Amino acid sequence: MIKAYFDKLRHSPKGYRLANTVFFFLSGFGYSSWASRIPHIKAQLHLTEAQFGAVLFAFPIGLMLTMPFTGKLLNKYSSRYIMLLGAVMFNLVLALPGFAAFVWQLIIILLVFGASRNIFNLSINAQALEVQKLYPKSIMTRFHAVWSLAGFAGAGLGYVMVTQHIDPSQHLLGVSILMLAVTACFYPLSIHTEPVPEKKKFFSMPEKNLIKFAMICFVSMACENTMYDWSGIYFQNILHASPKLTTAAFVFFMTAVTLGRFLGDYAVTKFGIKNILLNSGVFITVGFLICFLLPYIYPTIFGYVLIGVGVSCVVPLVFSIAGRSSKLSSGSALTSISTIGYLGFLLVPPMVGFISEYLSMKWAFLIMALLGGLMILMVNKIGEEEE
């Protein structure tokens, strides 16, 4: 019965969409499963915060180093093959952090983990662009909504594992095996794409018409990761809030991100991509301004919600519009934009720390509001023919 159902879905838009949804879920679930065990692994290796922070930097290094390489692969082979490669690597490496007995082992694991996440995430987005072409209405933001939902699920499972005193090695190994099985089941439903070979340098800056999209992604990723890294500390240090309120504020932010992504496709159909991106920039700007001007618990929570809605749909919509308007293949367009976008994800949050150290985190949040203004300027440069 199950085999007949899968056979019916194969080579159909519904089947392609289901497969891509599952792979987005795997990406979010696997990453949040790892993140949920970070404190235990840190304690297991007897590392200080500073030492562990330096070790964690191996993950984005692996991610950034493989960005041009992934673009080349997506131009040479069908994105479904690269997605399979990324998924298998990601699932296998996920099993290893709990077994690391030495710091150097964890560094190597995180380098490969970052590389596999880059290959996996770029390829599932390339697949999503191909599936989107089969549907008259926008479906891009829902794929990313599923990623966020999977993040909640992975974190929830992690909480259960911690409270039941399950060792990270057993927890992550179990998740790895389960995700490999799901990969094997749903890979046959994925869409086949024809590669578009391009003679391009191994690493190059985005072409001129992609710069605005790259900058929009830069701002969105910078603001989103700033919230991941600093929203709780802002509540503790600036607002002097209790741990419960601090956690609640972050849950409000994450819920806003997830709901924004689930509702994003409906909003795009009704208002258009450019209007949604423009309002996203406004929400980000106003949200950070509220945190700066009204540093009290409930106004700040409202600001967090606005920021969450603001960052929720930007990346999937930019990928969608740039994939259509660029002269490059979708793989090259995604790689070019992601390279600049991830720089925002990696570089801006540490700068928030430096600004907070010498001035105040309030002033750092004001600078984030100014970045939101930059997004508004970049969105205004998008022409009607590019939408």
Image (cartoon, rainbow, N blue to C red):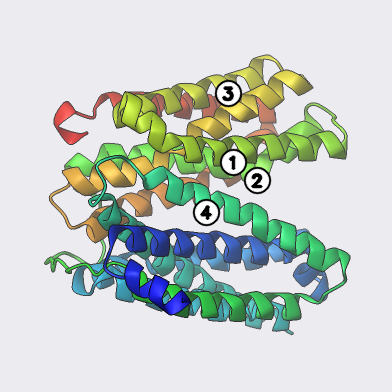
The mark that comes first in sequence, 4 or 1, is: 4
Residue 155 sits in which quadrant? Answer: bottom right
Kind of residue sitting beneath label 1: Thr
Residue at numbered disc 1: 226
Q: Of the residues under marks 2 and 4, which one precedes in the sequence?
A: 4
The kind of residue on which mark 3 rests is Gly
- According to the image, label 4 marks what residue? 147
Image quadrant containing the C terminus? top left
Q: Is residue 312 visible?
A: no
Q: Determine which residue is flagged by label 3.
A: 287
Q: Residue at x 51, y 75 (%)?
A: 182
Q: Which mark is residue 247?
A: none
Do the numbered discs 1 and 2 sit on residues whose CB atoms are within 8 Å?
yes
Question: Which of disc 3 and disc 4 is earlier in sequence?
Answer: 4
Q: Amino acid at mark 2?
A: Asp
Q: Residue at x 85, y 30 (%)?
A: 241
Secondary structure category for the residue under label 3: helix
Q: CA distance from mark 4 to mark 3?
A: 23 Å
Q: Secondary structure at mark 2?
A: helix
Give the percent coordinates (x, y) of residue 181.
53, 80
